[in-house]
Image (spheres, rainbow, N blue to C red):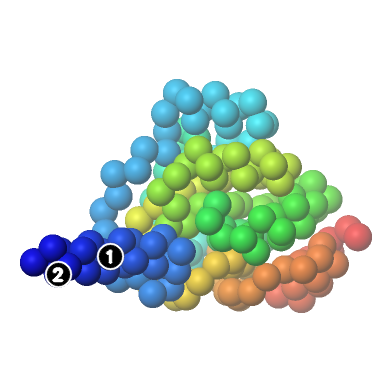
Amino acid sequence: MRRALLTVLTVLLLAGCQTEQAPSQASAPAASNVDVDTPALRTLKQRIGVEQCEPGASRGELPHVTLNCLGGGPDVNLSRLRGPLVINLFAQWCGPCRAEMPYYQQLHRKARGEVRVLGIDYLDTQPARALDLVRRTGVTYPLLADPSGVLRPDFKIRGLPGVVLVDAKGKVADVEFRVVRSYAELRNLVQRELDVRVPR
C-alpha cells in the first residue's frame, strides 16, 4: 500500500513539472487565479521602468482576447491593436527567452515610432520572477500576462520563445517559434514581414 501511494505521488509530481516546463504538451488552458497586479508587482514594475500598456483604439485581426497588464495597468484587448507591431512571447522559465529579450529591447529602442514591441508572459504562474527576468535583461517595452495560456489556440503555440508580427492593418503577417540569435536577425525578419525600415 505504501509503495503504491509513493508511486502515485511521484507520477503527480512529474506531471506538474512537465506542465510548467513544457507548455506545448499541456492540456487545454484552464482559468487562472494568478494575480499579476499586486502592490509589490506595481512597485517592481515602476522601479524597472517598464512602459505602461496601451489598450488600442481600432479593430485589427488579432484574437478577441483581453489580457491583464503585467505588474498593473489597463487591460488590453488584442483585437484593438494594430501594427506595425512585434509581439515577443516569453516566460521566466524559458531559458532561450532570456538570451533573446535584449534584441527585442534594441528593436524597441531603435525603431521607436516605426515599430512597436509588446511582450506577453505566456503560461507563467510566477509574475514576480517574470519581472525579475525583465529587470535583468533590460526590457522596458509594455508587457501583458497570459498565465492560463488562453492564446494557445489562436497562435497555435507549441513552445517558447515565439514572435508574432502584425502589420499596419492589424493583420498577423507571421508567427514563428524559434530563438532569435541577434538583433540583425530580428531586424531582417521585421523588415521582410512588415515592410518597414528598421535602423541598424
Among numbered discs 2 and 1, the one appearing first in the sequence: 2
Residue 157 vertical placement versus 42 (above, below): below
Q: Residue 176: x, y in percent?
A: 60, 75
Identify which residue is drawn at 42% across, 39% down. Answer: 36
Mark 2 vs 1: CB contact within 8 A: no
Secondary structure under tag 2 reads helix
Q: Decide if residue 134 is in sight here.
A: yes
* Amino acid type at image mark 2: Ala
Lateral position of residue 169 relative to residue 153, left or right: right
Q: Kindly indicate the quadrant of the structure image that contains residue 50.
A: top right
Secondary structure under tag 1 reads helix
Residue 156 vertical placement versus 140 (above, below): below
Lateral position of residue 70 relative to residue 9, left or right: right
Identify the residue position indicated by label 2 in the image. 4
Q: Kindly indicate the quadrant of the structure image that contains residue 175.
A: bottom right
Lateral position of residue 194 relative to residue 23, left or right: right
Residue 172 vertical placement versus 59 (above, below): below
Query: How many badges with numbers are in the image?
Result: 2
* Amino acid type at image mark 1: Thr
Lateral position of residue 12 relative to residue 39, left or right: left
The quadrant of the picture occupied by the N terminus is bottom left
Q: Nearer the viewer, residue 114 or 92?
A: 92
Identify which residue is drawn at 35% across, 56% down. Answer: 148
Q: Decide if residue 169 is in sight here.
A: no
Q: Residue 167: x, y in percent?
A: 63, 67
Pick out the residue farthest to the right: 200
Disc number at residue 10? 1
Q: Residues within 10 Å of mark 2 (few under 14, many from 20)?
A: few
Q: Residue 10: x, y in percent?
A: 28, 65
Q: CA distance from mark 2 to mark 1?
A: 10 Å
The quadrant of the picture occupied by the C terminus is bottom right
